[in-house]
Amino acid sequence: MSHLTCIRLIHWNVAEAQEKVSVLESAGYEVDYEPFTPQVLKELKNSPPTALVIDLSRLPSQGRDVAINIRHTKATRHIPIVFVEGEPQKLAQIKALLPDAVYTDYIRILTALKQVSLSV
């Protein structure tokens, strides 16, 4: 995962995740995705991606918890986090905890990735 523009997608629905992976790859990004398990957190520490994209359309509290874990771990706290989708009330709560993350939707995902300096 040492590619300059490698993104790790955290998504809780495999079919939906594959659609998102296709969109990002067609825009020129290398995307790493697998169903989330605790092993994924270990992989992030050993081989950090250029950015982490966390989908909040499903299980937003789990997405929040993953991001907090990333921020509290020395090996991963530098990774830019981009949250995608989510209900406004849940987003407000997450923004209060993680104000340094970028918040967007899939319509603006490519702009958000450029915002965290991930141009392809």
Image (cartoon, rainbow, N blue to C red):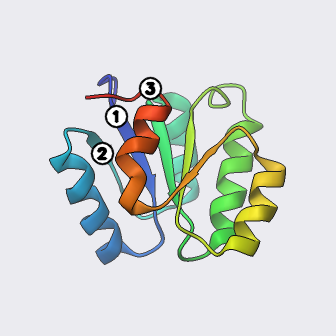
Circle nearer the viewer, 1 or 3: 3
Drawn side of residue 82 relative to residue 63, left or right: left
Amino acid carrying label 2: it is: Val
At 66% from the left and 67% from the top, the residue drawn is 62
Residue receiving disc 2: 31
Tag of residue 51: none
Q: Secondary structure at mark 3?
A: loop
Res. 49 in view = no
Amino acid carrying label 1: it is: Cys
Q: Where in the figure is residue 79, as x and y percent of width and height?
A: 57, 31
Residue receiving disc 1: 6
Amino acid carrying label 3: it is: Ser
Using the rendered view, name the quadrant where residue 99 is placed.
Answer: top right
Res. 45 in view = yes
Observer-nearest of 11 and 98: 98
Tag of residue 117: 3
Drawn side of residue 13 relative to residue 119, left or right: right
| In contact (CB < 8 Å): disc 1 and disc 2 | yes
> What's the CA distance linking mark 1 and mark 2?
6 Å
